[in-house]
Amino acid sequence: MSNSLPVQFANVTVMTKANVYFDGKVVSHTVLLANGEKKTLGLIWPGSYHFGTGAPERMEITAGACRVTLDGQSATKDYAAGTAFDVPGNSGFTIEVKSGLCEYICSFLPA
């Protein structure tokens, strides 16, 4: 995966209502790009959390680190800032943050 993650998005619409999960342990905001792409920018506090997916997603880690297990797999992989992983549509993943905050960009990919 590419480790040249964006540091900013130009000409976007930002939804002001946060997406809050797990009693505030995972929080993101939706960003709509001019070309119609949808992304969320968020952070994850220490803990372990499971998310389901409708559409395929790419999770790019922008700060911190996490450990991920994709649904249907037993292998767990570590991801640090500058790395990314893809999650199939109609699937899910468990993400674990050991300490500190993990910041991410989630891109919703075409099916």
Image (cartoon, helix red, strand yellow):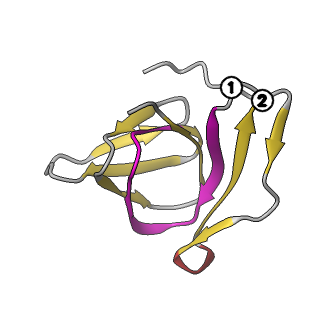
Q: Residue at 49% of width from left, 18% of height from top? A: 2
- Secondary structure mostly seen in magenta is strand
**Displayed quadrant of residue 8:** top right
Magenta span includes 30: no
- Amino acid, disc 2: Phe
Q: Mark 1 packing: few (<14 Cα in 10 Å), some, or many (20+)?
A: few
Task: Tell me the mark number nearer the camera, choosing from 1 and 2.
Answer: 2
> Residue 17: x percent and y percent?
77, 65
Percent across and percent down for residue 15 are 78, 54
Question: In the figure, 22 relative to 106: above or below?
Answer: below
Is 46 part of what is drawn in magenta? yes
Q: Say which element carries label 1.
A: loop
Please provide percent x and percent y for residue 65: 49, 46
Distance of label 1 from label 2 (alpha carbons): 7 Å
Q: Quadrant of the N terminus?
A: top left
The residue pinned by badge 2 equals 9
Give the quarter of the image for residue 95: bottom left
Q: Secondary structure at mark 2?
A: loop
Q: Amino acid at mark 1?
A: Pro
Q: Are marks 1 and 2 in contact (CB under 8 Å)?
A: yes
Q: Residues within 10 Å of mark 2 (few under 14, many from 20)?
A: few
- Asked if residue 101 shows in the view, the reply is no
Q: Residue at x 45, y 61 (%)?
A: 98
Q: Residue at x 22, y 53 (%)?
A: 71
Position of residue 79 in the picture relative to residue 25 (left or right): left
**Between 106 and 82, the one nearer to me in the picture:** 106
Q: Residue 50, image x and y in percent?
A: 36, 65
| Residue ranking furthest to the bottom | 23
Say if 23 sits above or below 99 in the image: below
> Is residue 45 something that shows in the picture?
yes
State which region is magenta.
Answer: 37-60
Residue located beneath label 1 in the image: 6
